[in-house]
């Protein structure tokens, strides 16, 4: 029945955004206990609070319309015996890699998973609300950093989607994120301690940051793509008000290029492959190079993309705008999306 439904849909127009969720992102959450066997106390010291943070992150993901949803598969306590994990209860930056290597070497005690995002909640993490590695190479041997760490007491509004963004290859907008639709972010010049109460250590105060951004004379879209971006620090320091409704996020949470990069990362880096229930493959009839299905090298026809995406369940075909003059028969379920404009299929 679903195959028939998809065949009928293939003759229609696919419009952006399409908010239905199709791909699960699996999450394993662990509290690092102190030497007395107690959890760190703060905002996320219990299961209900963590689930609420995930649900809020999913609200943002749904607004982005790419079909991803975070699913918590477990919440566990990491006790100090027999691996002295309590030493990571207050985590310093130079212990970030050490916690990961220790967890991998003691997978049972630390609940290290190869089929989920490994999140550890600690009492403190070196003046930061969270830490996450940005994939730079694909490492099936497990040598590449994969861990995500959150400080227990930080406000959740953007921190969870921000650090999870890093995990899936997102870079700060002020660190040259490699995305064409995010302009130069002048916050890069905030390299001194301005002794702010709202801007954070080694950052400009909000008033300074906004002045620097306004001086760029960007269009409203280009400005908002930075101002309201999950991977910028404007919202993280409340420079634009609380990052939650009633703000009109539209498609601003992450830009189209950022979201493409996020989707590509789940396929590109094998240490991330098992953390999702499916992948996104891209199709663009105007592309002239060698096709691999990534956003930067999409398939040229829906048929060629479908042949790959339908080989396993739960995948998405993301079509660039235009009319694909193809006659297709779908024999396996594949979700079709068009995130940048209308796409039609048919003669």
Image: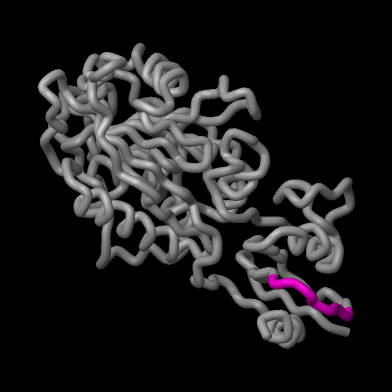
Asked if the magenta segment contains residue 329, the reply would be: yes
Query: Where residue 113 sits in the image (x, y, percent)?
Result: 47, 36
Looking at the rendering, the stretch of residues picked out in magenta corresponds to 327-333
Q: Can you see residue 215?
A: no
Asked if the magenta segment contains residue 338, the reply would be: no
Report the residue at 61% width, 55% height from top.
Answer: 278
Say if 43 sits above or below 302 in the image. Answer: above
Report the residue at 86% width, 62% height from top.
Answer: 304
Q: Is 150 displayed left or right of 327 in the figure?
A: left
Choose top left, top right, bottom left or bottom right for residue 236.
top left
Choose top left, top right, bottom left or bottom right for residue 269.
top right
Could you tell me what secondary structure mostly forms the magenta stretch? loop
Choose top left, top right, bottom left or bottom right for residue 178.
top right
Q: Is 80 displayed left or right of 190 in the figure?
A: left
Q: Is 312 displayed left or right of 173 in the figure?
A: right
Q: Which image quadrant: the C terminus?
A: bottom right
Say if 46 sits above or below 13 in the image. Answer: above
């Amino acid at each position: 029945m679903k195959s028939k439904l998809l065949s009928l849909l293939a003759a229609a127009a696919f419009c952006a955004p399409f908010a239905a969720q199709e791909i699960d992102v699996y999450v394993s959450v662990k509290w690092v206990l102190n030497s007395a066997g107690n959890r760190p106390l703060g905002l996320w010291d219990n299961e209900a609070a963590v689930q609420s943070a995930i649900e809020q992150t999913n609200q943002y993901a749904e607004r982005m319309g790419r079909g991803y949803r975070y699913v918590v598969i477990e919440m566990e306590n990491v006790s100090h015996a027999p691996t002295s994990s309590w030493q990571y209860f207050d985590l310093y930056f130079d212990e970030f890699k050490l916690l990961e290597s220790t967890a991998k070497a003691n997978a049972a005690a630390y609940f290290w998973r190869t089929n989920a995002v490994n999140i550890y909640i600690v009492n403190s993490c070196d003046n930061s609300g969270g830490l996450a590695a940005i994939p730079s190479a694909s490492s099936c041997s497990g040598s590449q950093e994969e861990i995500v760490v959150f400080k227990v007491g930080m406000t959740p509004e953007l921190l969870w989607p921000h650090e999870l963004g890093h995990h899936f290859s997102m870079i700060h907008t002020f660190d040259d994120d490699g995305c064409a639709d995010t302009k130069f972010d002048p916050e890069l010049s905030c390299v001194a301690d301005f002794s702010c109460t709202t801007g954070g250590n080694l950052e400009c105060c909000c008033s300074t940051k906004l002045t620097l951004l306004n001086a760029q004379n960007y269009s409203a879209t280009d400005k908002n793509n930075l101002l309201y971006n999950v991977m910028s620090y404007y919202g993280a320091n409340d420079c634009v008000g609380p990052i939650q409704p009633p703000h009109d996020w539209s498609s601003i949470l992450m830009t189209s290029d950022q979201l493409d990069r996020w989707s590509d990362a789940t396929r590109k880096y094998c240490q991330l492959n098992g953390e999702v229930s499916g992948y996104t493959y891209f199709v663009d009839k105007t592309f002239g190079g060698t096709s691999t299905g990534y956003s930067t090298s999409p398939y040229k026809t829906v048929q060629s993309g479908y042949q790959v995406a339908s080989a396993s369940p739960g995948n998405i075909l993301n079509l660039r705008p235009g009319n694909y003059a193809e006659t297709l028969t779908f024999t396996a379920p594949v979700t079709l999306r068009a995130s940048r404009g209308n796409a039609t299929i048919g003669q």
